[in-house]
Image (cartoon, grey):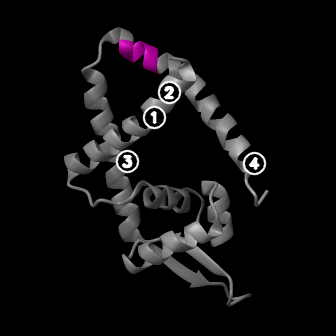
Amino acid sequence: MTTAASLSRLLGPLRRAVLRSTRTAEDLPDLPEAQIELLRVLSDEGPLGTKAAAEQLHTSPATVSNLVRTMSSSGLVDRNTTHRDLRTVQLSITPRARRLLERYDKASRQTLERALAELTVEDRTALATAMPALERLTEILSVRSHEDSPAS
């Protein structure tokens, strides 16, 4: 099996296993990954308009609007109109969501630290060595997905 095929088969199950372990470890609510990603963008970059949030997530504004509808009713995202244009909505993370995101991040880090401790030294070294390459791969794919998106 090629590296690309192996990586493709591994990433989804790895991501889901980390999220599932994280939720279980801290008895966190079952937030979909897309909601967590939007909260992370709003925490790091917000407040943002729907279009800007969609660009950050490399998805469509309609997808973000659907996420926001659910997250707003759950008290995770605030929708505020701007003073200059009442049609323009700015999205921001709520204090409750910020605390929840901090819990997710802390639990995820601790879950991964415990799992990594069970690996051999060689496996941990191999993962640490692979991090820069994985970061570059992520950047390449992010740039390509942005260039290939219909909104570009």
- What are the residue bounds of the magenta stretch? 123-127
In the depicted structure, whether residue 32 falls above or below residue 113:
below
| Residue position for label 1 | 11
**Residue 90: quarter of image:** bottom right
* Mark 3 or 4, closer to the camera: 4
* Residue 51 point in image, percent of width and height: 68, 68
For label 4, the SS is helix
Which residue corresponds to the image point at 63% horizontal and 80% vertical from the top-left?
Answer: 89
Q: Is residue 113 left or right of residue 49?
A: left
Label 2: how many Cα within 10 Å (few below 14, some 14–19, many 20+):
few
Amino acid type, residue under disc 1 in the picture: Leu
Which residue corresponds to the image point at 37% horizontal and 9% vertical from the top-left?
Answer: 122
| N-terminal label among 3 and 4 | 3
Q: Is residue 135 left or right of residue 87?
A: left
| N-terminal label among 4 and 1 | 1
Name the outermost residue toward the top. 122
Circles 4 and 1: CB atoms closer than 8 Å: no
* Residue 103 point in image, percent of width and height: 32, 53
Q: Is residue 66 left or right of residue 56?
A: left
For label 3, the SS is helix
**Residue 62: quarter of image:** bottom right
| Residue position for label 3 | 105
Q: Which mark is residue 7?
A: 2
Q: Is residue 38 visible?
A: yes
Quarter of the image that includes the C terminus: bottom right
Give the distance between the C-alpha atoms of the residues marked 2 and 3, in whole angstroms.
Answer: 24 Å
* Residue 139 point in image, percent of width and height: 66, 37
In the depicted structure, whether residue 84 falls above or below residue 137:
below
Name the outermost residue toward the front. 1
